[in-house]
Image (tube, helix red, strand yellow):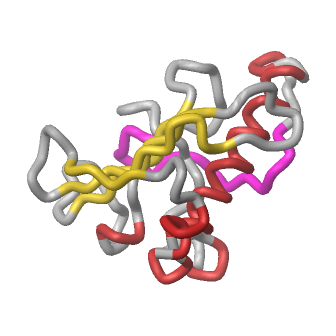
Amino acid sequence: MGAVRTRRQTLSRVPHHHREDAQRAHLPHALGGAGVLAPVAVSVRFEHAPTYNTYGLAAQDYPRVWAERGLPSPHRMPTDDSLCLFFPHDPPERRWHSALGLLTLLDLARDHLFFEHHWRTTGGWSGGEWLGAQAPHGFPGSNTR
C-alpha cells in the first residue's frame, strides 16, 4: 500500500482485461531516474494462477513488469518482453518478493531501466556495459535467456 500512497498521482490498479485472476498496476509516466531523459510508463501484472513459469516461486513473488517494450536488452524475458529483474533461484535476500512491497519492485524496475539505457548507450550488443549485478541466464529445457 505504500506505493499507492507515495505515487498516488500516477499509480492505478485495474483488472487485467484478459484474465479474471490478474491485477495490473499501471504507472503512466511514473518512473524517471538519473540519465533517463523522460519518464517511462511501467506496467506490473500479478496473477493468482500465472500462465508463465514461476520457477517454483509463489505467484505473488514473480509478477511480470513491462516498460519500453521492444528495446534491446540483455535482461528481458524472450516470451513476452517483460523485464528480467532477478534470478528466481537466488536466495530470498537476493531477489524481490512480495513481502518487500510494490514500491521496492518499482525501484528495482527503475534501476533496471537505467541499466538498460546505459547498456544501450555504451554499445549494446557490441560490448555495452551493464551496471548492475547479473545472474546466469536460462534454465535447462526452458525458453528463457
Q: Nearer the viewer, residue 7 or 84?
A: 7
Residue that extends furthest to the left in the rendered view of this protein: 20
Tell me: 103 left or right of 59. right
Residue 49 visible, this orientation? yes
Q: Percent position (x, y) of residue 101?
A: 52, 74
At 17% from the left and 62% from the top, the residue drawn is: 49
* Rendered view: 135 above or below 141: below
Q: How many labels sit on residues?
A: 0
Residue 141 on image: x %, y %: 35, 46
* Residue occupying image coordinates x 74% and y 50%: 111
Examine the residues drawn in magenta and state their main secondary structure: loop
Instruction: Say which residue appears at 67% left-offset and 58% top-offset.
Output: 107
Find residue 121 and report its horizontal and vertical position in percent: 86, 20
| Residue 79 vertical position relative to residue 94 in the rendered view, above or below | above
Would you identify the image quadrant in which residue 2 lies? Answer: bottom right
Q: Residue at x 55, y 47 (%)?
A: 84
Q: Is residue 83 above or below residue 69?
A: below
Q: Does residue 39 appear to the left or right of 126 in the view shown?
A: left
Q: Is residue 119 above or below residue 70?
A: below
Where residue 136 sits in the image (x, y, percent)? 64, 52
When asked about the image quadrant of residue 105, the answer is bottom right
The answer to whether residue 145 is visible is no
Q: Residue 140: within the magenta?
A: yes
Q: Which residues are magenta?
A: 130-145
Indicate whether residue 143 is drawn in magenta.
yes
